[in-house]
Amino acid sequence: MMMRSNQHTGLRGRILLTVGITTILIMMLMSWGILYRWRQGQIQREESSALAVSHAFSVAVIDALVYAGQGFDQPEGLLDHYVELFMVQNQRLRTITILDPEGQIVAQSWGHLPGLWVSGELSAIMAVPGPRVVIDQTDEGSWALETIMPMHSGNHRWGVLVMTFEADSIRSRIAQGFFLLLLFSTAVTSVLLLLLWMLLSRILNSLHTLVTAMDQVDFETGFVPPLPFRSDEIGQLNLGLHQMGQRLQQSRQDVIRAEKQVWHAERLATIGRLASGLAHEINNPINGVRNCIFAIKSDPQNLEQTQEYLDMMDEGLSHASGVIEKLLGFARKQQSGLAPVVLNDAVESVVRLVKFKLERKSISLETELAPDLPAVVADRQLIQEVIMNLLINAVDAVPEGGLICIKTMVGGDDILLSVQDHGHGIPPHLQDQIFDPFFTTKETGEGTGLGLSISLGIIQAHGGLLAVSSNPESGTTFTVQLPIDRPIQTEEKE
Ligand code: ADP
């Protein structure tokens, strides 16, 4: 859950970062374009108004110079007077300088330092062909706008009028415009990101609710927690989850139905195998008995033959009753006498009974019985029957002079007993069938196919496990696992 909420933050952060950077770049480009055009407009306006002022003043100056050139009487310092008057009238003027065609100053505003012109050398100024405007920084650090206006009347050149205006106000106006635009862009970007953040939070919260609901889906029952109805894409996801729950429920029911069918089919197959095995095991002796009866009937006087056939009939009927007895035991899995049983003792009893079989095939038996083995509560007779079945199977599997090993040990809360042989092993495809009743690979008359199925029933009734591992190289190991101090199941499985 922690990881998921981090992922939400990460997704939100990534989207906000991407959109934020993109918006800031777009706003910067737009602001720069707007500011550039606006600045150009401001400067052009200032330049044309400065040129207009300069032109108006140059007319008066040319008049005065023309009069003086034609020898008319003029008051002393007329041009200086003009200059001072104009300076007073125009607050933005910093200097006025009137130069004659040789570059000599004819008149200049009072109180202002000469050489404020920012447009370059005197020769360059004198050579200017027409009116010119320059905006630049002065040596003092302030900004100035300078007009250079050549003065002509007809073909006569009267000199040059240089007027310098302060330009700090334009710059501060431009700076103010820049600041306002920056403020506007920042506000727009912030509002945009805030709206985006709110939208993303809503979407991610809905997704979070959906993920929580997915976590709570019960795969056993197909239960999906209710989710709010929505008409958008998240609503479609909610609906999809809900439908998935319904499909899950449906397929769960299908699986249960299919499992039941398989179970029934397996039961039928087992019953079929049981019936055919039973028929085989009982039919054979019954047929034998009938043959004997037929033979006795056909020659009742032959007492010797009758005696022989009676013995055969007895043997056949014993076999049939043995099978029936085993089957009854198999069906009931009866546990008559429950008492503490030490498996080591049960193993030793069985080994004593099977000893002659081992000797007949010269089989070596190794026993590794754990000392001080705790007892299990069990039916000693039944447990011995299990060990006997496993040991006889092992004897049947190993060749002459083979080796069988029986071990007991404690494994956690269980007692383990293993019977290991180095015989021919059980092919993998048969390992599922060996516990079925009447499954046998032995010759007719040698095996009934009931040993393992009965043993499995007994061990399961004791709350234990019976497992097999086998391969043709190393042989077969059957392991019995019985719980220590665990109450025994008394109910029979169906
Ligand atoms: P039965 O011994 O009468 O055949 P079981 O139920 O005891 O019946 O065994 C079923 C089959 O399992 C045997 O016929 C045999 O093929 C196989 N089997 C059991 N134990 C072993 C073993 N130790 N090694 C090889 N095969 C075995």
Image (cartoon, grey):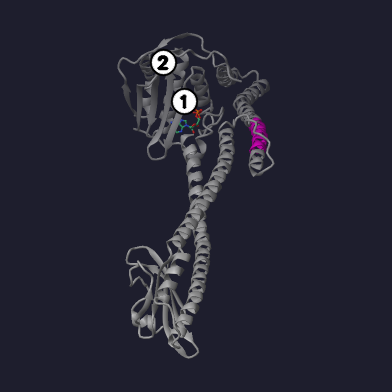
Name above or below for residue 202 compared with residue 155: above
Q: Position of residue 50 (x, y in %)?
A: 49, 71
Seen from the viewer's position, the closer of residues 40 and 282 is 40
Magenta span includes 247: yes
Residue at x-position 39% and y-position 22%: 416
- Residue 387 in sight in this render: no
**Amino acid at pointer 1:** Leu
Question: Between residues 59 and 188, which one lies in front from this camera angle?
Answer: 59
Lower position in the chain sequence, tag 1 or tag 2: 1
Disc 1 from disc 2: Cα separation: 15 Å
Answer left or right for 354 relative to 33.
left
- Return the residue at label 2: 484
User: What residue span does the magenta drawing correspond to?
Assistant: 241-262
Q: Residues within 10 Å of mark 2 (few under 14, many from 20)?
A: some
Pinpoint residue 332: horizontal percent, then vertical percent: 57, 16
Q: Quadrant of residue 477?
A: top left
Crowding near pointer 1: few (<14 within 10 Å), some, many (20+)? Answer: many
**Residue type highlighted by circle 2:** Ile
The mark found on residue 466 in the picture is 1
410 or 413: nearer the eye?
413
Q: Secondary structure at mark 1?
A: strand
Q: Nearer the viewer, mark 1 or mark 2?
A: 2
Q: Could you say where residue 153 lies in the image, as x and y percent from the top left?
A: 49, 86
Residue at the farthest bottom position = 155
Q: What kind of secondary structure does the magenta stretch mostly adopt?
A: helix
Query: Residue 40: horizontal and vertical position, in percent?
Result: 50, 67
Q: Is residue 108 left or right of residue 237?
A: left
Dot label at residue 373: none
